[in-house]
Amino acid sequence: MTDPREPDPEPSASEMLGQALGGAARRAGLDPSEGASTGHVVWKAMGGWRGVLESVLPGLVFIVVYTVTIDPATGDGALWLALGLSVGIAAVFTILRLIARQPASAAIGGLIAVAVAALFALLTGEASNNFVPGFITNAVYGTAFLVSALVGWSLIGLAGGFLMGEGTAWRQDRRKRRVYFWLAIAWAGLFAARLAVQLPFYFADDVTALGTLKLVMGLPLFAPMVAVTWLAARALYPRRDT
């Protein structure tokens, strides 16, 4: 019998990671206790209309402004103007959230990402380098999902186990292990596909095509992946009576 005076055992690294991932997923709207529809869950994970605009508009403005200002003689667009408007729009979204006292972590993260990307482009004078931080992010995320699947500690499983209140017990269930393995592989494949499709245009210095592909392979691919992940993970657990 456990002595009540003894301190609780320290959580393992996997449990701490699962709690962090699950907490992030819950804050993003992936909370199974709410019993929401898949469409509602995906829309909330995207941040609704404001989240979509915050994610898409800075990049869209950059590529449109840069493209329409391309000088036929040099083949270059107005880099400073395109980057300035892109960062400015991201800053406006962040300020609006702060004024309204709404959660601004996503907007601040987006602002930092846009600012870092702009810095890459300005320091090198190459518009295509505006996309380098995105390549790094996709490579890191893709590698993390792939490695987690191959070593048997799927990041999707860690998050799902925390959300469903079973911690890491899912690893003792062959079916859950298999599903979480393939979900992690699918996410790794998404990030790898972005790199495989976009990098050739980066090396070709085709900024317009690169920017367009980044938008097309962003939320339009993210949303269905969230839906598939949500449905597959929920199917592993019996419905709870409410």
Image (cartoon, grey):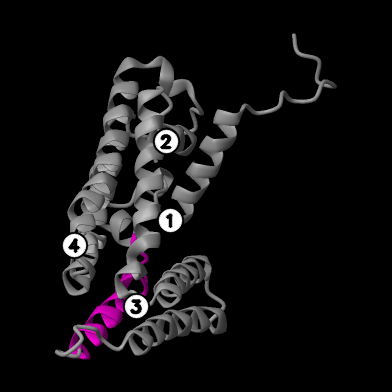
Disc 1 marks which amino acid?
Answer: Ala
- Measure how far apart labels 1 and 3 are at the Cα level: 21 Å
Query: Where residue 155 is drawn, which disc sits there?
Result: 2
Q: Position of residue 77 (x, y in %)?
A: 25, 86
Q: Which mark is residue 147?
A: none
The residue mark sitting in front, 1 or 4, is: 4
* Residue mark closest to the camera, 1 vs 2: 2
Closer to the observer: label 3 or label 4? 4
Specify which label sits upstream in the sequence, 3 or 4: 3
Residue 53 visible in rendering? no
Residue holding disc 4: 201
Q: Amino acid at mark 2?
A: Leu
Q: Earlier in the sequence, mark 1 or mark 4?
A: 1
Which numbered dot is residue 58?
Answer: 3
Residue drawn where x is 19% and y is 90% of the image: 71
- The location of residue 126, given as percent across then percent down, is 33, 74
Residue carrying label 1? 28
Determine crowd level at label 1: few under 14, some 14-19, many 20+ residues with C-alpha closer than 10 A: some
Disc 2 versus disc 3: nearer the observer: 3
- Name the quarter where the N terminus is drawn: top right
Q: Residues within 10 Å of mark 4 (few under 14, many from 20)?
A: some
Tag 3's secondary structure? helix
* In the rendered image, the vertical position of residue 25 relative to residue 149, given as above or below: below
Sequence-first disc among 1 and 3: 1
Q: Position of residue 91 (x, y in %)?
A: 48, 82
**In the image, what residue occupies the spot 41% across and 46% down?**
140
Would you say residue 129 sits in the magenta stretch?
no
